[in-house]
Image: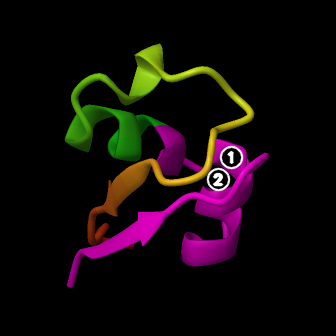
Amino acid sequence: MAKTCTTSEGDLLDTLCQHYYGHLAGTVEAVLDTNQGLADEAQPFRAGVRILLPELSM
């Protein structure tokens, strides 16, 4: 099941993916594909960015 997370000041996408999925293989790309415009957000993220973390088949 997909999960939505809300960033805290200073979060990084690869760190969020590692924490949620337990690995980085393909996860950053999948999250960027799912969240239109997320690639345009400056990193580290500001607080309050909502990110949909899709369910991935392993």
* Residue placed most toward the observer, 17 or 4: 4
Point out the image quarter for the C terminus. Answer: bottom left
For mark 2, what is the residue?
24
Kindly identify the amino acid type of the residue bearing the numbered disc 1.
Asp
Rendering coords of residue 16 (x, y %): 64, 60
Q: Residue 13, located in which quarter of the rendered image? A: top right
Look at mark 1 in the image and give the residue it sits on: 14
Q: Where is residue 51 in the image (x, y as percent from the top left)?
A: 37, 54
In what element is the residue under mark 2? loop
Q: Label 2 amino acid?
A: Leu
Of labels 2 and 1, the one closer to you = 1
Q: In the drawing, does residue 11 fall left or right of residue 2?
A: right
Which of the two discs, 2 and 1, labels the residue nearer the N terminus? 1
- In the image, is residue 46 above or below residue 57? above
Q: Give the range drawn in magenta.
A: 1-28
Let me know if residue 11 is in the magenta part.
yes
Question: Residues under labels 2 and 1: Cα distance?
Answer: 7 Å
